[in-house]
Image (cartoon, grey):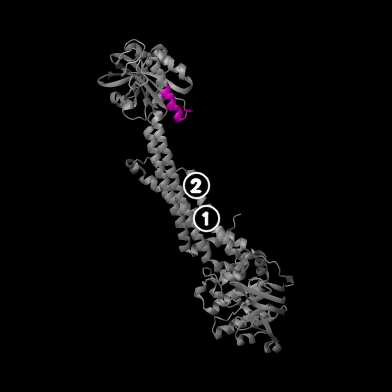
């Protein structure tokens, strides 16, 4: 297929008609550049949103208990509702199929000492599933496991920042640490996308904590992630059902908003995902609009080019060029210019995004960028547009009678 | 070589149509040097365009080299032009961004000849028209006479059966006119059929046969002194 002679013809035509080639190249390069920049910035905005809400698992639901604010079924106002271990079983039994992970939690603020360093930190007694809720990632060692729960081991997993506070540059892994006067072994260190404060928590087996702090079966709250196959609306319904059934179980008035508190991320997600969809549509419209502008631009230029070349095409036909050869020549030239300048526009756009990307963080644009398939798709779209835009006038010009073409100016 | 019978051609002008050729009968044998004379509007350019397959006729028959020209599409016409016909135009019609050599070589490109070969052949033809030293000049660096000689070289390079010249001297002064006509005479002496359209008597007198057209009809067809001299 590679025809050196044909390419030579095309290169000559491009290089001897610089203004014309530059104009069409510029249109395409500019369209792709704009497309890359707008799309990249749009993606950056989306990244910011995602990042903002990805600190905890997106499908989290937290339930806690409090004092009643309404009298109900002969119970006085101001009664303390206390979750216990049987509530854990109750939730698992009744809503098992709607739950992905669930962990009870007890949280106390306590003094932590390692050698000469000490400070006040929050310790949380949890189940292994809790790691999912916080989106915590282990960087050394491991998280709490079920054996720790069974054996009520005195082990802890600490956050990265806590390790930094107390151990400096040293590793805390496998060290002994004194928390509230009791010695624990550090079995792991984690990082948490939630930030510094989330990285100062201490996690210990729920059962260990329950025994050491109160030696009862009390639970502060439950952390749940709902089944990801639930839609957002289904998840909201699930949250409401869960709250309602816990209210029933603890004889709380259905109108008592405080006695049992529930925070369902799905409600936030609903707003956020609405916003994301809106943003996505906006990005799509912008990208599509830019492309259309590029397509219109390249079409206009192709029409102009063919018109300008009518006489030349007439000469070529008079000396023996068939219409097919003429059309092929114009199209090959158009595709070549479009592809090259599209690529240049892409490089320029990606380069600019790379360069200014970091300084855009304060405008809520995080890691702006475009995926390769999107840009390649856009370039291909423009090439196809250039082909179609070039084909129609080229076809017409190629079929004009040479006598008419020759008399054109 | 060229045989035309009862040829008609009209051009639509708005709702009406202009009847340009009203039944032309013309027979040109191989090796003839014919000029078509006529005032503007007599239909001579239209006749050349039809003979040159640059335009299509409405009625009548046209045989080129024994082949009936009928139901021509652009592709067939292009191939026939490339094979049998060479064109010389009043306005030269050189491609402005190509050198003299590349312009001459262009018909060979469409014949599918390799680059090296066609540039060699083209250079031979430029030498023949006395422009070897100007091979790498662009058309706008050449004088009118030189441009026309480049155009003639381009018309000859495919070794056509017929060279069609539409007012080849129309844009030239008398000295260059003579040199161009001498060139056409040389070509004819080599046995090529040459078909010239002109409105200048001096030019027509140098051909061997003059066909006069008026209002779309042939009014006279006679041999010239030049032909008797041979």
Residue B98 in the image: above or below residue A257: below
Chain letter for the residue marked with disc 2 in the picture:
A
Q: CA distance from mark 2 to mark 1?
A: 15 Å
Main SS of the magenta segment?
Answer: helix
Horizontal side of A128 relative to B6 (left or right) equals left
How many numbered marks, from 0 up? 2
* Residue B13: quarter of image: bottom right
x, y percentage for residue A274? 42, 36
x, y percentage for residue A7? 56, 59
Label 2 vs 1, first from the N-terminus: 2
Furthest residue to the top? A215
Q: Which residue is mark 1?
A: A386
x, y percentage for residue A399? 61, 64
Residue A376, disc: 2
Residue B126, disc: none
Q: Secondary structure at mark 2?
A: helix
A170 vs A199, nearest the viewer? A199
Q: Residue at point 61% right, 54% down?
A: A1
For disc 1, the neighbor class at 10 Å (few under 14, some 14 to 19, many from 20) is many
Q: Are marks 2 and 1 in contact (CB under 8 Å)?
A: no
Regarding residue B230, the answer to whether it shows in the image is no
* Residue B172: quarter of image: bottom right
Residue A234 is inside the magenta segment: yes
Q: Secondary structure at mark 1?
A: helix
Residue bounds of the magenta highlight: A228-241
Chain letter for the residue marked with disc 1 in the picture:
A
């Amino acid at each position: 297929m590679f025809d050196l002679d044909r390419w030579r013809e095309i290169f000559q035509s491009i290089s001897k008609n610089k203004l014309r080639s530059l104009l069409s190249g510029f249109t395409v390069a500019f369209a792709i550049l704009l497309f890359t920049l707008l799309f990249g910035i749009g993606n950056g905005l989306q990244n910011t949103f995602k990042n903002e809400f990805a600190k905890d698992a997106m499908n989290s639901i937290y339930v806690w208990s409090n004092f009643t604010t309404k009298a109900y079924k002969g119970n006085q106002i101001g009664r303390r509702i206390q979750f216990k271990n049987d509530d854990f079983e109750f939730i698992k039994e009744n809503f098992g199929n709607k739950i992905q992970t669930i962990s009870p939690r007890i949280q106390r603020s306590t003094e932590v000492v390692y050698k000469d360093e000490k400070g006040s930190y929050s310790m949380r007694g949890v189940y292994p599933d809790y790691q999912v809720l916080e989106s915590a990632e282990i960087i050394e060692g491991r998280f709490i496991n079920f054996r720790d729960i069974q054996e009520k081991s005195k082990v802890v997993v600490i956050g990265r920042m806590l390790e930094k506070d107390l151990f400096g540059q040293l590793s805390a892994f496998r060290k002994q640490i004194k928390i509230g006067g009791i010695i624990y072994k550090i079995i792991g260190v984690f990082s948490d996308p939630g930030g510094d404060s989330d990285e100062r928590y201490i996690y210990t087996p729920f059962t260990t904590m329950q025994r050491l702090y109160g030696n009862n079966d009390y639970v502060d709250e439950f952390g749940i992630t709902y089944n990801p196959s639930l839609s957002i609306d289904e998840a909201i319904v699930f949250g409401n059902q869960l709250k309602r059934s816990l209210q029933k179980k603890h004889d709380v008035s259905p109108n008592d908003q405080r006695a049992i508190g529930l925070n369902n991320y799905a409600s936030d997600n609903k707003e956020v995902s609405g916003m994301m969809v809106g943003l996505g549509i906006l990005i799509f419209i912008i990208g599509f609009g830019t492309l259309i502008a590029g397509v219109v631009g390249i079409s206009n230029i192709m029409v102009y080019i063919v018109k300008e070349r009518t006489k030349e095409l007439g000469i070529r036909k008079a000396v023996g060029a068939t219409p097919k050869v003429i059309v092929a020549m114009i199209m090959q030239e158009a595709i070549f210019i479009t592809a090259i300048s599209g690529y240049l526009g892409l490089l320029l756009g990606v380069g600019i995004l790379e360069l200014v990307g970091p300084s855009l963080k304060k405008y809520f644009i995080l890691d702006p960028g475009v995926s390769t398939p999107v840009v390649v798709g856009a370039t291909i779209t423009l090439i196809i547009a250039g082909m179609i835009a070039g084909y129609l006038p080229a076809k017409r010009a190629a079929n004009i009678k040479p006598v008419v073409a020759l008399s054109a100016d | 070589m060229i045989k035309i019978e009862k040829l008609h051609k009209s051009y639509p002008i708005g709702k009406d149509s202009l009847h340009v050729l009203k039944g032309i009968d013309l027979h040109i044998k191989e090796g003839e040097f014919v000029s078509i004379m006529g005032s503007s509007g007599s239909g001579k350019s239209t006749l050349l365009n039809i003979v040159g397959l640059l335009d299509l006729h409405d009625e009548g028959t046209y045989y080129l080299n024994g082949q009936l020209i009928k139901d021509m599409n652009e592709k067939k016409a292009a191939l026939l032009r490339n094979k049998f016909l060479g064109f010389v135009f009043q306005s030269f019609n050189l491609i402005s961004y190509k050198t003299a050599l590349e312009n001459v070589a262009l018909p060979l490109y469409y014949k599918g000849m390799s680059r090296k070969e066609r540039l060699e052949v083209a250079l031979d033809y430029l030498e023949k028209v006395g422009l070897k030293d100007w091979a790498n000049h662009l058309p706008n660096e050449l004088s009118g006479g030189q441009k026309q000689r480049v155009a003639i070289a381009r018309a000859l390079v495919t070794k056509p059966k017929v060279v069609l010249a539409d007012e080849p001297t129309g844009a030239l002064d008398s000295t260059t006119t003579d040199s161009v006509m001498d060139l056409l005479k040389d070509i004819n002496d080599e046995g090529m059929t040459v078909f010239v359209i002109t409105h200048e008597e001096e030019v027509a007198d140098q051909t061997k046969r003059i066909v006069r057209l008026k209002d779309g009809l042939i009014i006279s067809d006679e041999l010239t002194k030049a032909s008797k001299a041979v």
